[in-house]
């Protein structure tokens, strides 16, 4: 008897709730059968050049032999074990690698299983730190508008409350403090107006502010805005002056995406707490972490309740994810990713900058392996997606933003196909 053939896409439409979409009127989805290098192969045989690195994670491309080998070797040993009271070599080795790459003052790591949770952990660290210092009024966060830090409740509370994706939850979220986002572009001298609102708030309310949290240099899903690194320098100085912790959310920007290993290196400053994730495992498994300096860890550990930090994700320190992440970081440590990112940046500037004059375009922004076209009006995602698939590329716009963050291994021809498709969409 022949097996019954299922219409998998029909099952998907009926039963599976995809991110940022409606079950009543879902966006079209495309079934991936396999992936290798920078290409996704659909179930109907078509191949697409991936311009998104699977939401910015697959920096080495797909089906990488070193990452495959790491996953295979580890799964034959132990794929998961609780991290409470138990440790293992992959978690220890990965910590050592991360500390070789991260700002040197960060020497404590707390593993988690997603970027949103790493932000939750960072917020809890900041608040518990001040409780331990007998300053319980310091419970609020200060941040800039147009930011995005995740979809869980703590993370949502520091996303843009008006123009972000979570406005409907405003009445039940913690009420933090927002100031205007910096307007100075990456390669321009910082204007005082970029930092004065922060200074004003700290002068008046620093006794209730636990930390400032920002995405350094590049704001991600809140608007793909790229701003002057001098803002970070000023934030560090103001935090030191007013006794406020500084949190950098490097989930999207970390591991080379902006041309530096971490975006804060453009300013030469280090935060007290830093969130990492996304590209950490090269897109293979979900893994994130929150890094902290010794002041934060010692401060929390000196508090009541025996100094116990009150958090513990079930899958934190997952050995399979840690092993693959270790292999991914080894590729960065041993490879010349900087040259690849500089090459991508140069071509993105060459291909996309002329589009700034297109009547549909409001702005063009490029930094490292990030290329952004901001349109005057919102893009019809379903129509754009269909067009891009017909052009043999995978690009997923959102709002008014058309952007790509390709794998670092992409060659010039494939990158050109992505940018040509972007230009073609503007003419549709």
Image (spheres, rainbow, N blue to C red):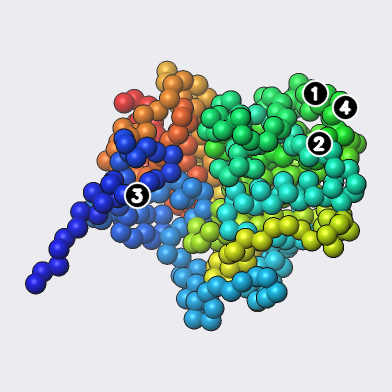
Label of residue 240 in the image: none
Residue identifier under label 4 = 203
The answer to whether 261 appears left or right of 141 in the picture is left
Residue denoted by label 2: 209
* Nearest to N terminus: mark 3 or mark 1: 3
- Under circle 3, the secondary element is loop
Apparent side of residue 191 relative to residue 146 in the rendered image (left or right): right
Task: Name which of mark 1 and mark 2 comes first in the sequence.
Answer: 1
Q: Relative to 262, say whether 321 is above or below.
A: below
Residue at 83 percent of width and 39 percent of height:
138
Drawn side of residue 108 relative to residue 339, left or right: right
Query: Is residue 59 positioned above or below 319 on the image?
Result: above
Residue tagged by mark 3? 16
**Considering the image in quadrants, where does the N terminus appear?**
bottom left
Residue 148, visible in the rendered structure: yes
Q: Relative to 180, does residue 53 appear above or below in the rendering?
A: below
Residue at label 1?
A: 196
Q: Nearer the viewer, mark 1 or mark 4?
A: 4
Q: Which callout, 1 or 4, points at the residue further toward the start of the chain?
A: 1
Task: Measure the C-alpha gap from mark 1 to mark 2.
Answer: 17 Å
Closer to viewer: mark 1 or mark 2 = 2
Indicate the position of residue 405 as horizontal and vertical percent values: 50, 44
For the C terminus, the quadrant is top left
**Residue 347: x percent and y percent?**
50, 41
Chain-order first, disc 3 or disc 2: 3
């Amino acid at each position: 008897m022949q097996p019954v053939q299922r219409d998998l896409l029909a099952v998907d439409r009926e039963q599976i709730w995809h991110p940022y979409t409606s079950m009543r009127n879902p966006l079209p989805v495309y079934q991936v059968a396999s992936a290798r290098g920078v290409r996704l192969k659909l179930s109907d045989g078509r191949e697409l050049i991936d311009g998104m690195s699977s939401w910015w994670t697959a920096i080495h491309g797909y089906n990488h032999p070193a990452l495959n080998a790491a996953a295979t070797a580890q799964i034959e040993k132990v794929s998961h074990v609780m991290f409470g009271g138990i440790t293992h070599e992959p978690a220890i080795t990965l910590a050592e690698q991360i500390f070789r790459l991260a700002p040197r003052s960060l020497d404590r790591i707390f593993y988690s299983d997603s970027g949103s949770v790493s932000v939750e952990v960072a917020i809890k660290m900041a608040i518990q730190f001040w409780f331990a210092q007998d300053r319980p009024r310091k419970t609020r966060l200060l941040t800039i508008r147009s930011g995005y830090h995740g979809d869980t409740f703590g993370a949502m509370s520091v996303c843009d409350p008006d123009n972000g994706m979570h406005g409907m939850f405003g009445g039940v979220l913690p009420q933090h403090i927002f100031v205007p986002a910096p307007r100075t572009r990456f390669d321009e001298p910082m204007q005082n107006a970029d930092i004065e609102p922060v200074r004003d708030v700290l002068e008046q309310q620093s006794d209730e502010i636990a930390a400032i949290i920002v995405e350094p240099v590049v704001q991600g899903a809140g608007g793909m805005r790229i701003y002057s690194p001098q803002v970070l320098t000023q934030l560090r100085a103001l935090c030191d002056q007013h006794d406020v912790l500084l949190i950098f959310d490097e989930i999207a920007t970390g591991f080379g995406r902006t041309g530096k290993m971490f975006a804060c290196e453009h300013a030469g400053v280090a935060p007290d707490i830093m969130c990492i994730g996304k590209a950490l495992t090269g897109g293979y498994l979900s893994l994130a972490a929150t890094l902290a300096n010794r002041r934060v860890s010692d401060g929390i550990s000196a508090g009541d309740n025996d100094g116990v930090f009150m958090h513990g994700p079930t899958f934190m320190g997952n050995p399979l994810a840690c092993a693959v992440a270790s292999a991914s970081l080894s590729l960065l440590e041993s490879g010349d990713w900087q040259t690849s990112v500089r090459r991508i940046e140069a071509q993105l500037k060459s291909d996309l900058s002329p589009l700034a004059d297109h009547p549909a375009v409001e702005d063009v922004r490029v930094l490292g392996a990030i290329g952004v076209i901001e349109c005057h009006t919102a893009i019809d995602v379903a129509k754009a997606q269909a067009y891009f698939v017909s052009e043999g590329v995978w690009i997923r716009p959102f709002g008014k933003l058309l952007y790509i963050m390709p794998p670092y291994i992409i060659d010039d021809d494939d990158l050109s196909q992505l940018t040509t498709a972007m230009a073609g969409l503007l003419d549709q």
